[in-house]
Image (spheres, helix red, strand yellow):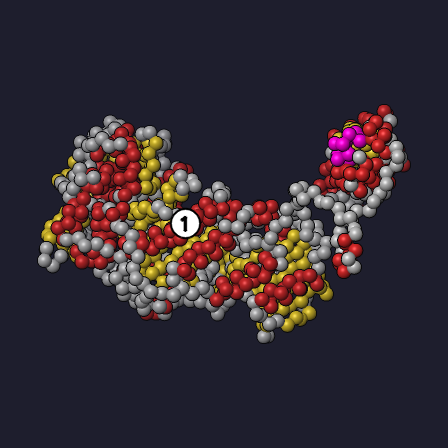
Amino acid sequence: MPSITAKYGDMCKLLEKEISAEQMRDQLNMLGVETEISGDEMKMDIAHNRPDLLSPEGVVRALKGFLGIKTGPSIYKVAPSNVVIEVDKSTGPIRPFIAAAVVNEVNLTDDIVASLMQVQEKLHASLCRNRKIGSIGVYDFDNVAPPLKYTTVAPEEVKFVPLDSDFELTPKQILEEHSKGIEYDHLLRGLPRYPLLLDSNGGVLSMPPIINSEATRVTPGTKNLFIDVTGTDERATARALNVLVTSLAERGFKIFSVDVKYPNRKITTPNLKPVKTKLSAKNVNDYLGLKLGPAAIARVAKRMRYGVEDVNEKSGALTLLAPIYRTDIMHEVDLIEDIAIGYGYDRLEPELPPVLTIGEPLEIEKTCKRARLALTGLGFMETMGHTLTNPRREFELMRLDGNAVEISNPASEEFTIVRRSLLPSLLSALYENRRHPTPQKLFEIGDVSVLDAEAETGAKNIRKVSAVLIGKDANFTQIKAVAEAVLREINLNCELKVAESPSFLDGRVVELISGDKKIGVAGEINPEVLLGFGLENPVAAFEIDL
Amino acid sequence: MIGSLSVQEKKVLRNLEEKADVAKLAQKSGMDQSAVMRAALSLNERGLITINELKSSIAVLTPEGAVYAREGTPERKMLVALASSGGETVDDVAKRASLPDDQVQIALAWVRRKGWVEFAKRDEKNILAITEKGAAALSKKSSEEELLERLEAGGQDLEWMPQEILPELENLERRGLIEIEDKTTREIELTALGREATAAGVELVEEISDLTSDMIKSWMWRGAKLRRYDVLAPGAPIYPGKSHPQQQVIDELREILLQMGFTEISSRIVESEFWNFDALFQAQDHPAREIHDSLSVSNPEQTKLPPPDIFNKVARAHEKGTAGSTGWGYNFSKQISQRPVLCSQTTAATVRYLASKPKPPVKVFCISRVYRHEKIDYKHLAEFYQCEGIVMDKGLTLRNMHGYLKQIVGKLGLEKIRFRPGYFPYTEPSTEADVYFPDKGEWLEILGAGMFRPELLKPLGINYPVLAWGIGFSRLAMLKLGINDIRELYKNDLDWLQEKRMI
């Protein structure tokens, strides 16, 4: 879950009301924003589906409604700026979409600059899928000469000074040498041409989705902003722009639109008109278990910053205006959750429904329970190992060959495959206890996974039980007796068959056969295996499929 | 006075002529040393004897020293190997001397320090050659080596060692081949009272400690003197075989859920992306599906697709929406659906079950391991348990969801619960529940819940509301077991397993 930081003082200023830190935290929690406040520092966890809350401005906008300071929608006026962006058709196969806006009369305090940088970074990570489908640029508009051109260039066709550099670099050099170029190189790698945003003097604004130019850098003295979002998904570019400019508008800054001329159409961005949505009072009450009338629902909707266009008291149908920044509204249930939040989760009293069912345990768990009782009764202690392991432990140390479920993106070298056997887990547990006096008796009951071409997912789980004995008296006779006791208690009839296994000592190992299927093995562990696991006492072991 | 002594105490007195150390006394009396000490302590209390403690320092071999004493020092092995060849490279001589890798550098350092060999060039190679000193050493063991061999027979008291051997002793100690151990021996000496009391001799009346079957059958036990035990003395503890503590938490939860009428289902370790993500209406380019969050699988390479009816409906829900939803608006990929992944959420199992049982009512739970792309530390595991349940029936509401959460928490013996909005990709509305733990004096977040989205239900043919909840299993288990490091959930240390009380 993404998290953002903010200043408590700045939040109060935006809220236009002084409330205690504790009250702010509690109210935000009830709004679904998990909040920690210490002194002036605030940290808030924002749900993946709410990019509009990725700025303090956005959070306060929601909180104002929740606290009743300002209910109903924020109205965003957009006047034309007369700035035009001409889109070259060469962007088509590379990064075809651009949306832009101008924001005038900004008064950038440190808090606002920090918030602007933060929302840009967080939107890149979430809505923009790490800049893949959208990337945002913010510029000092006074250093930009409209009209603009969004086009592409060959990797070494132009040179400009990118942000945080002292030299002119070509796009190719930026990808190879600049820190942002190296970080996002994978988004342009292999393309014949790179996107570029230019002004009427040929000055470079940015090389999306990598970096802006130093010449258009936003500084504390910046009075007017130009903002663009380029990308591969038109809806995502519009959404990112809308979230960004509406949060700036909450500061009282003025928004102006930009005309985008594609080769075959012309659009004006941003479009901040709310979206009409239907809500049925019956559905609200059915979902939440409440008895709210349409008018009451309308009042709650306003607290959640919706506009209410129409309420039909008779049919219970409401027409709401969803703010444009609410990119998460896909279905009526999304509105219903908002009504629940606005009504107050703490007021949704628990109520058990009369659903009559009879619980049944899994058959396999019943078997496991009996095996567990048998083994603990025999003085064995249960251990629990990881199902993730590595080929050295699973195969090499056990002197075996074979294939196991393999992980393609392991997080550590220790865990690269899924175990097929419990025995290595138990031998590792014995090593963990090498300083503990012998004899020791351990067992594990757990799942393994084996490859199986017939299985739907190409592998299947097998539940196994395995036990080990270590000490001077750990021998075949002992462990065979334990294995047979377990088999007896779980009602599994088995025949013994002389066997050979590189993990065990020749002449001291048997296979357990049920029907004509091999379901287990018991014997004395080969000393080579013992030394591999760092063990210096005899070990006898069995493993059985349950 | 003598009459009130135990047989053991009498034995000690009988065998004590003025004074003797404990080991000798044990040998003489046929008792073991601890029994002698126990008897001596009690005799001391009665003022019959005194116990004198004598401190001494003993030189003993370390494990490394013991190996060298037995097999010869690495430098000796190298010297001998070199002597039979005249001159060779380090690698060759090490090989011929059969020196383990970790001893080659040790050998090299010491043959040089002792001046036994020198380096020379031959055919562009650095070779070792024996010096005169080395040749002399071949026929005579150094005093250090002699000392090692002598110590192999057993530790020696420093007090008895000749003065001239002390430098060698220091050298060997610095090399880590010997250790000086402080040893305390105890000596028992009769006091004046003791001498007086034993002057008339100490007579032994046989006391019987073990009651036998023969004694019982023959009535003999009636005439025998059964020794009185010190029944208040603490004994060594013993421990029963037990379930693993984490398993105990699992079993407790299972029991609670069965009581509440839930049926148990199981999950798969290897799952398809279709059931792990797609069927839960998680967009294929959703950040939670990224490589950094779940563990992808390269063998097996592919999973089988679900029935075409289900597959097509799910694909359509993602692309264009379903049940009045706008959908995600992207191109759904069959290939991504078929990729195998290590199950990252038990919801894969509950949704699979729902798809196979669309008729109400359904009440099932799953307690299984799930897998994440995490490096293990005190807060994170790559595999951990999830406990999840669903209820499907006509007319279920969010308040009913809160009802179930409250009941589960109540069954866990916790009373206070509070609800706030939550977020899960496949539920709407969603709830997060905090539970008050009186022992900690804290509200902790241990439950997440919600109602499955219509975009998830519709393609699977489910026409009724479904409540879904999950317990933060690891957190609950840590609280129940009183541990702060999540890795300890998989701790197999016997001391811990034995000491840890059953929950």
User: Residue A156 versus residue A481: which sits nearer the camera?
Assistant: A481
Name the image quarter holding the N terminus of chain A. top left
Residue at (26, 39) in percent of width and height: A27
Above or below residue B490? Residue A247 is: above
Instruction: Check the image and name the residue furthest to the right.
Output: B139
Residue B109 on image: x %, y %: 75, 33
Q: Where is residue A120, by image quadrant?
A: top left
Which segment is the magenta one?
B40-51
Q: Which residue is drawn at 21% across and 54% down?
A: A290
> Which residue was labeled with disc 1?
B413
Residue B355 % position (x, y): 35, 66
Magenta residue check for A444:
no
Give the left or right position of residue B290, taking residue B31 as reference. left
Q: Quadrant of residue A65?
A: top left
Q: In this view, does B446 lie to the left or right of B110?
A: left
Tell me the chain of label 1.
B
Judging from the image, what secondary structure is the residue with disc 1 in? loop
**What residue sits 15% from the left and 49% below the top?**
A296
Extreme residue toward the bottom, this view: A515
Q: Is residue A427 left or right of residue A140?
A: right
Residue B8 position within the rendered picture, expressed as x and y whole percent measured from the top left = 79, 41
Would residue A350 be visible to someone looking at this image? yes
Q: Which residue lies furthest to the top in this view?
A: B163
Q: Nearer the viewer, residue B74 or B419?
A: B419
Q: Compared with residue A490, is residue B16 higher up or lower down, i.e. above or below? A: above
Residue at x 78% of width, y 38% of height = B4
Would you say A305 lies left or right of B176 here? left
- Amino acid identity at mark 1: Gly
Q: Residues within 10 Å of mark 1 (few under 14, many from 20)?
A: few
Quarter of the C terminus of chain A within the rendering: bottom right
Q: Where is residue B394 in the image (x, y as percent from the top left)?
A: 27, 64
